[in-house]
Amino acid sequence: MKKETMDILSDFSESQYRNIKTIIKEQSKVCDDVFFELNTKFDLGLDINKIKINYKPNEKQMQINYSNDTIITITNKARQEKHNKFNYINVTSYHMPDNAFIEDKSRYNKMLVIHNMVNKILTLFSHQNEYFNDKFLFLEQVNNEIELKNTSTEIADYFRYGVKQYLVLQQIDSILDKGEHAFKEVWINNFTNKSTYINKIKFTKNVTNTYNVDLIYNDEVLSSSARVNETTLIDYINKCII
């Protein structure tokens, strides 16, 4: 039943993560469409086919990419504000070659196109900031939706971790009761602090509440200690649980 609970929680988390990725992808496409409207309305003359927006709701940020390179980042820096108002813009540094020394005309022309695009977007953002933000106001609802999904995913992951830890503790208790545990081979530091390859651990409790522990590989005892405390024994068991 506990294993089934973990599977249910795991499936829920994975579905939420996929759903969030889909929402972000869809909203990035909507942002592309809005930018197309802005380009038309203000006659910016941008090559929209080369411009894509990558919306990042967790940072309340949109990255404007030109030919797959991030050129401009526009962010809501005042996160305490009620609305998703974009009030900060950052231009990624790019090299503008000196015309007197240019040899690669295609590279120079590309830089001019980027420079022209940056200037137009900066001007739009500065002169039409209120209109710009109004067009992207729908992202506030998207942020709220994603935050709710993230919260539900975190809760599911928290419970899944708790169930997993409980199952591990149950397994450790069972091994402590049996006094031995066989497993797939693992490398482990033995009682002389040397790396040892083992596939079984066996132990008995002493009258002093310490343990006599054998580290075994294929029925051959490779390392032993007669005074292992329970904390150290549990640490060894933890490393042997696959």
Image: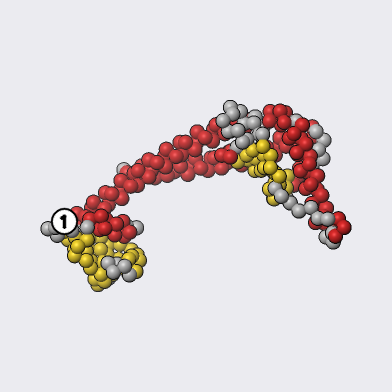
> Image quarter for residue 242?
bottom left
Task: Identify which residue is drawn at 14% across, 60% down.
Answer: 206
Any part of residue 69 in sight: yes
Nearest the camera: 178 or 108? 108
241 up-or-down from 31: above or below: below
Query: In the rendered view, does 155 fall on the left or right side of 202?
Result: right
Please give the residue where the numbered disc 1 appears in the rendered image. Answer: 209
- How is the structure coloured here? secondary structure
Q: Residues within 10 Å of mark 1 (few under 14, many from 20)?
A: few
239 up-or-down from 42: above or below: below
| Tally of numbered tags | 1
Nearest the camera: 128 or 241? 128
Query: In the rendered view, does 157 fall on the left or right side of 84?
Result: left
Task: Identify which residue is drawn at 26% across, 53% down.
Answer: 172
* Secondary structure found at label 1: loop
Query: In the rendered view, does 37 fall on the left or right side of 55?
Result: right
**Which amino acid, by three-letter code, is at mark 1?**
Asn
Residue 160 pos. (x, y %): 38, 43
Residue 60 pos. (x, y %): 60, 37
Residue 150 pos. (x, y %): 49, 38
Nearest the camera: 15 or 165? 165
